[in-house]
Image: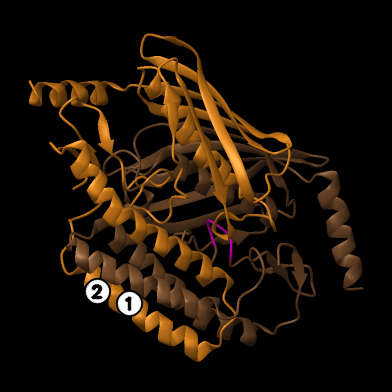
Chain colours: A brown, B orange
């Protein structure tokens, strides 16, 4: 796929697709966790591996070329970013974050990170924290009507972030022309652990793409 | 586990463990990719999901409590960071990066990112680029004998990073006392796409932990 793919699905159709693909991805997330933590013996590991490969073959019996891309509805909204590495409903690499937004340019999410997101023992990988903040800051920019790609992201680690339940939130701080400045943080029950500032830019080629996309529906 | 766990395995024993767990995690990575890209029908998805859950149960028949942690050999080297979100041999969220180092404080890796690491269509998620750079910059600090946790990470996106074959590299720029400044970048065949600077700090509690760990082997 690898592009902005126009589609014209009803909300019901999208919900039905989500009900099929969401639970599969969640089952694969559980398998990822078990793969890290299992202590069964080598013969059993090998047997499970063979069966995992067989299931992969069944799914690949019919599949899209390349990556999932982003499916865009007739109104130009991004209706399905299901392949996304942070929020993708179909992507077992994604925790996934379920995002909330408001039109003032705020975005937030409550989520839980398990063994698959570890860096130092028992702690969230610093890079995972950066990855999540990039997404949440970008969603805040988009929520405020100022979508863009990350230009610069600065992440400050205040204290270690424990694995477990967390919150991430971000808001637009200010903007000018095609640049939007966003701030955000990850918190645990004890308060902020990681802070970030991001500069989001809508580059020339993306403005052209958006323009083409809108024309396609007119 | 969730800690620095001392272990005393020979290189051969570690290699045998890697030969068991590495291929399972790789098979799960393929399944993650297929889960994103499959177009088989809903009944087949549901059937595969049931079998994935059964395989998870088999792996969970015996498993460690909590996350994998970091297994440390008698010399204090981190012999097994197999749960790590970026380099973890057993972690299907990790691409994984296979790192090379030199004692001058350089680290680098050639790797390929597929559908599971997508942000904008056909492109690496900006947060994934940040995540990888955090790891590679931290490895450069460690390779130069100055291990630490990320204090600040600044990532500058020069141009979009395509999914596919990439290289990440980093080197220590300078250091003072417990602070190490590292620079690095991700490149595709056409040159640098993303640059990063990181400040790595060995915090008080980590210095105490390292000190305790070393005493444990004396």
- Dots 2 and 1: beta carbons under 8 Å? yes
Q: Dot 2 surroundings within 10 Å: few (below 14), some, or many (20 or more)?
A: some
Q: Dot 1 surroundings within 10 Å: few (below 14), some, or many (20 or more)?
A: some
Tell me: residue A17, above or below residue A195: below
The chain that hosts pointer 1 is B
The prevailing secondary structure element of the residues shown in magenta is loop
A63 with respect to A119 (left or right): right
On the question of residue B182 being in view, the answer is: yes
A13 with respect to B66 (left or right): right
Q: Nearer the viewer, residue A188 or B77?
A: B77
Labels 2 and 1 share a subunit:
yes
Tell me: residue B34, above or below residue A32: below
Tell me the quadrant of the picture where the C terminus of chain B can be found: top left
Q: Nearer the viewer, residue A98 or B85?
A: B85
Residue at (65, 83) in percent of width and height: A11
Residue A84: in magenta span: yes
The chain that hosts pointer 2 is B
Q: Residue B53 shows which numbered tag?
A: 1
The answer for how far apart the CA atoms under marks 2 and 1 are is 6 Å
Q: Residue B57 shows which numbered tag?
A: 2
Outermost residue toward the bottom in this view? B43
Residue at (25, 65) in percent of width and height: A45
Residue B32: in magenta span: no
B49 with respect to A172 (left or right): left
Q: Which residues are magenta?
A: A83-87
SS category of the residue bearing label 2: helix
Residue at (59, 68) in percent of width and height: A82
Q: Quadrant of residue B216?
A: top left
Residue at (36, 83) in percent of width and height: B50
Where is residue A47 shown, x and y percent of the image?
27, 71
Where is residue B34 shown, x and y percent of the image?
52, 70
């Amino acid at each position: 796929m690898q592009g902005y793919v126009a589609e014209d699905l009803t909300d019901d159709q999208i919900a039905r697709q989500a009900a099929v693909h969401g639970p599969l991805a969640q089952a694969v997330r559980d398998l990822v966790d078990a793969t890290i933590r299992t202590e069964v013996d080598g013969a059993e590991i090998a047997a499970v591996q063979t069966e995992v490969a067989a299931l992969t073959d069944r799914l690949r019996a019919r599949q899209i070329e390349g990556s999932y891309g982003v499916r865009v509805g007739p109104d130009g909204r991004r209706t399905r970013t299901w392949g996304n590495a942070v929020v993708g409903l179909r992507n077992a690499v994604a925790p996934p974050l379920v995002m909330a937004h408001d039109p003032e340019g705020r975005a937030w999410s409550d989520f839980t990170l398990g063994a698959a997101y570890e860096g130092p023992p028992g702690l969230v990988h610093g890079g995972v924290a950066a990855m999540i903040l990039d997404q949440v800051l970008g969603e805040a920019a988009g929520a405020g009507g100022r979508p863009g790609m990350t230009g610069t992201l600065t992440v400050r680690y205040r204290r270690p972030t424990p694995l477990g339940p967390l919150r991430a939130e971000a808001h637009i701080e200010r903007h000018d022309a095609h640049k939007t400045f966003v701030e955000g943080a990850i918190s645990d029950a004890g308060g902020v652990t990681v802070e970030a500032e991001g500069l989001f830019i809508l580059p020339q080629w993306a403005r052209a793409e958006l323009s083409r996309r809108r024309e396609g529906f007119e």
